[in-house]
Image (tube, rainbow, N blue to C red):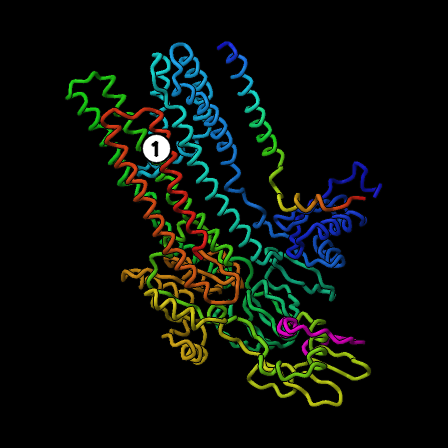
Amino acid sequence: MTALRKPAPALDRTVLTVPSMHCAGCMSKIERGLSAQPGIASARVNLSARTVTVEHDPAIEARELVRRLADLGYEAQARREELAPRLSAATPLLAPLAVAGFAAMNVMLLSVSVWAGADGSTRDLFHWISAGIGVPAIAYAGRPFFKSAWNAVRHGRTNMDVPISLGVLIATGLSLYETMRHGQHAWFDGALMLLTFLLIGRVLDAMMRDRTRAGVDALLSQAAQGAMIVGPNGGVSWVEAGKLAIGMIMRIAAGERLAADGEIVSGRSRFDQSLLTGESAPITLHRGDQALAGTLNLEAPVDVRVSHAGHDTTLAEIARLMEASTQNRSRYVRIADRAARLYAPAVHTLAALTVVAWLIAGAGLYQALVTGVAVLIITCPCALGLAVPVAQVVASGALMRAGIMVKDGSALERLATVDRALLDKTGTLTMGKPLPDPTTLRWLTQDEAAVAVALASYSRHPLSRALAAALAGSDIAAAPLTEVAERAGEGVFGHWFGLEVSLSRPQSGGATMAVALAIEGRPVRLIPFSDRLRPDSAAALTQLGQMGIESSILSGDRAAAVGEIAIATGLTAQANARPADKEALVSRLRASGRKVLMVGDGLNDGPALAAADASMAPGSASDVGLQAADFVFVQDSLVALPRAVRAARRTMAVVRQNFALAIGYNVLAVPLAMAGMVTPLVAAVAMSLSSLIVVANSLRLARAA
Amino acid sequence: MTILLLLIPAALAIGGLGLAAFFWALRHGQFEDPQGNAARILMDDE
């Protein structure tokens, strides 16, 4: 350690994600365990982000740190560069909110004294103090609104921030003028209160997006993508995906995904291409065959010579298709902005009419202007600004608790209008992975199950892991085994009280996937594996139908496999769809006026997910699927679909009620303002009351999901 | 009424102190790992 502390080369800093840590015990175990080791200067855990930041000797590689964490009992992965935490959306709004809240409270205290009857020099003093606090606070806390409003106006558009900014600025200007003229009314309290309420709405909205992003990031495969490369002298070393070059030989172990396209040069194995093509049955590839990046090696280690890397792979092609189709969706105009298009011109016309009417009625210019400004202040859309975000935040919170993550508020608006659903088959309607046949498992004796669990736990092979997971639920203790060895491509072999036991590839390689469980002196058990429909899929599809949403299957798999699922679910289906076909169908349906919901998980669904009006992906989806989808549901059950649609529709109903409430308030308040009867006291009461009503109405969504 | 000359600055100063404390906390990463901080009080250090 002392050698390290010399002026020596600066320490390297590596961030590792450790998804499994969850308590104080884990934190101290990791921090102390790592810092005690040679070459590591410090380790600091961030439990909220499930990461540990290690400062270490540059000689130690990230993979070595991962190994040391594995020794401590934690599965860890070096974090990919692009997943480094992006700036939080909520943090930049916290400081303006704090300033607005502080200023609003202090100014309100002074205003209460003025309303209570302070006059003369005391009232002037209070107004001047209010101005001293209020003007800088408004200039600082109002920036998020002014900026957004200015952007909209500059491009000839209007949004909710335009009437807000105008109202706040005019109220502040008028109050300053009144203060200088020793006038009776100053509106600093109203302007600040408005900003505080609106900032609360914005902060809640931003926190919701931060939380969802953290959840989705946790699902993304955080492993640095890459491959073990066989060197010319037979040695192997790890190379990152970005540095793979054509001609390199990758050694792909069973259970690993390919990082680049390539040709198999030795070995033969079965590959799962479902994420890439939607095809559910694994295909066998041997020497000379082409294997695609993103496919999963299921059986035996193979060597693959890289033929395309980086931007030339099939993966990169799909990414390009997706980029093109995202543009459709960015044309969507949010409901708050649509409301603002009607609202802003209406209130501005009303204010102008008020000024003209008072002038015609013979009032002085000053009085006419003050009344017009009062109309602008009273119509400043406090409740309207809260109507949408609060409802969406409450609904997203409810959905989050039900295991559905909502990427942003506009996704709820788009999902509510959906009347057509397209479902991918592999991984969406089905679980997307081979699962052991439950009937066979039930017929295993206690001993056999115990041996199977024990053997399976020694292997990282996908089938072994599926078997271990399936049996783990039925509280079976693993049998004590000795001399366990895993032979690549064959299975796991060991001894159990002197008897030879094994979990291996069956001798007769039939068309179906299976493993053979052999215990010396007993008949061999064959456990078949197959992909299965998600639980509750029938109920989920029926509910979608009752909501008026027509569903059909859109799959890249072969017609026979799709047909089987189509019969089981009673849906119409289209098979053999390539990524571009899927996207084309979505666009065609949208062009004919349907609102399309796309549900899919694979890379091949990416373009369609991006093109659809709204999209959902299961938590097991590929990184591309997770990033393209608006909603991510984490449980196995397909009931998440109708549940999300129902919650979205209820949210929009509440949003419309909120608009009605806010407009109702205006209908009452505007005539008062036009008659010149609104004082700052009336404005303060009306504003808080209407905001509270809107928030209370939105809270009813807490049980929406 | 002269008491106001004392009370108003006092009230503002106390409020401002709270605001300053909040800004300090924001700048110094006090809100970066709320879950971890909650768990850290349970760790018994050597």
Secondary structure of the residue carrying tag 1 is helix
Residue A80 lies, in percent from the top left, at: 60, 52
Residue position for label 1: A686
Against A614, is A57 above or below? above
Is residue B1 on the magenta stretch?
A: no
Q: Amino acid at mark 1?
A: Ala
The crowd level at tag 1 (other Cα within 10 Å; few <14, some 14-19, many 20+) is some
Residue A520 lies, in percent from the top left, at: 75, 87
Left or right: where A332 falls relative to A428? left
Quarter of the view holding residue A145: top left
Residue A436 lies, in percent from the top left, at: 59, 78
Against A123, is A285 above or below? below
Name the image quarter holding the N terminus of chain A: top right
Is residue A467 on the magenta stretch?
A: yes
Quarter of the view holding residue A664: top left
Provide the chain ID for the residue under circle 1: A
Residue A599 lies, in percent from the top left, at: 43, 64
State the extent of the magenta-drawn residues as a range. Answer: A463-491
Name the image quarter holding the C terminus of chain A: bottom left
Residue sitting at the far front = A116
Left or right: where A683 falls relative to A264? left
Against A12, is A282 above or below? below
User: What residue is shown at x 37% (from left), y 39% (from top)?
Assistant: A385
Left or right: where A389 falls relative to A453? left
User: What residue is shown at x 43% (from left), y 63% (from top)?
Assistant: A641
The answer to whether any part of residue A266 appears in the image is: no
Against A497, is A244 above or below? above
